[in-house]
Amino acid sequence: MMFDLTNEVRGFRNEGWKNYRQQFLGIVADRGTEADYEAAERQVHPGQAGARDRQR
C-alpha cells in the first residue's frame, strides 16, 4: 500500500522502487508470520525508548 501511494503521489512508476517492493515482499513472505511479528516488535521498542528519552 505504501508503495502504491508513493507512486500515486509522484505521478509515475519508478522501476527501482518497483523492484525494491518485490524484493521486500519476498523477504517478508519467506520469513513467515511469527518472524514478521518479532521483527515489528524489535522496531517498536527502540522507537518507544527514543520517545521516552526525548521527554526527559
Image: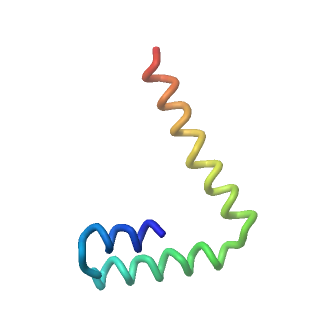
Horizontal and vertical percent position of residue 16: 30, 81
Quarter of the rendering containing residue 11? bottom left
Please say if 40 is above or below 53.
below
Farthest residue toward the top?
Answer: 56
Horizontal and vertical percent position of residue 55: 46, 18
> Which residue shows up at 69% across the image and 58% down it?
37
Q: Is residue 55 left or right of residue 28?
A: left
Q: How many marks?
A: 0
Q: How is the image coloured?
A: rainbow
Farthest residue toward the right?
Answer: 34
Horizontal and vertical percent position of residue 29: 64, 78
Quarter of the rendering containing residue 5? bottom left
Farthest residue toward the left?
Answer: 11
Please say if 51 is above or below 5.
above
Quarter of the rendering containing residue 33? bottom right
Q: Is residue 29 left or right of residue 52?
A: right
> Which residue shows up at 70% across the image and 64% down it?
35
> Which residue shows up at 48% across the image and 69% down it?
1
